[in-house]
């Protein structure tokens, strides 16, 4: 298919300044071989010819895997932890935020927050766990 030269009155796709999107237009005036002025078929507005814009690509959302974030946080915090200061975990004990805990199954952990009545969130090497406490 051959592309014919544009003349006034020919249809063309252009960016409309009033509609703010790519719409069909009619060429009103030419300058050399390029349309100089066009009229929008949607809003009937006349303006300088602006080539159609490429559609925007949808933004790519990067979802962070919670396990990866927890392992990264553990890697940052673990060098400053002293396992000798850790207290043995017991459901009958009360723990403050920042307390080191030694759990028989999960190992060394850091109490990060109090979740609710009798519950704390502890960061272990394997990830965050909700633990029962006094």
Image (tube, rainbow, N blue to C red):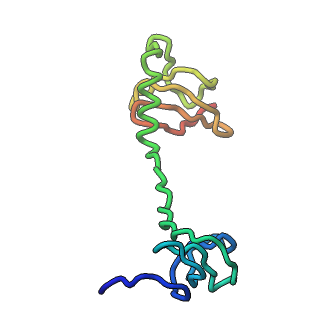
- Of residues 93 and 114, which is closer to you in this image? 114
Residue at horizontal 52%, vertical 32%?
122
Which residue is at the far left?
A: 1
- Of residues 107 and 76, which is closer to you in this image? 76
For residue 8, above or below residue 58: below
For residue 130, above or below residue 8: above
Residue at horizontal 60%, vertical 25%?
93
Asked which quadrant contains residue 40, the reply is bottom right
Residue at horizontal 62%, vertical 70%?
48
Which residue is at the far bottom?
A: 9
Quadrant where the C terminus sits is top right
- Of residues 28 and 13, which is closer to you in this image? 28
Horizontal and vertical percent for residue 80? 47, 15
Quadrant where the N terminus sits is bottom left
Q: Is residue 24 left or right of residue 105?
A: right
Horizontal and vertical percent for residue 116? 67, 40
Asked which quadrant contains residue 75, the reply is top left
């Amino acid at each position: 298919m051959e592309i014919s030269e544009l003349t006034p009155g020919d249809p063309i796709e252009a960016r409309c300044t009033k509609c703010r999107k790519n719409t069909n237009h009619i060429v009103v005036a030419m300058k050399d071989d390029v349309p100089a002025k066009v009229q929008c078929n949607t809003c009937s507005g006349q303006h300088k010819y602006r080539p159609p814009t490429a559609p925007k690509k949808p933004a790519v959302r990067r979802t962070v895997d919670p396990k990866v974030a927890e392992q990264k946080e553990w890697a940052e915090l673990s060098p400053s932890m002293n396992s000798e200061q850790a207290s043995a975990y017991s459901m009958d004990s009360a723990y403050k935020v920042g307390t080191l805990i030694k759990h028989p199954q999960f190992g060394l952990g850091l109490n990060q927050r109090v979740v609710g009545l009798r519950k704390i969130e502890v960061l272990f090497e394997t990830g965050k766990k909700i633990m029962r406490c006094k």
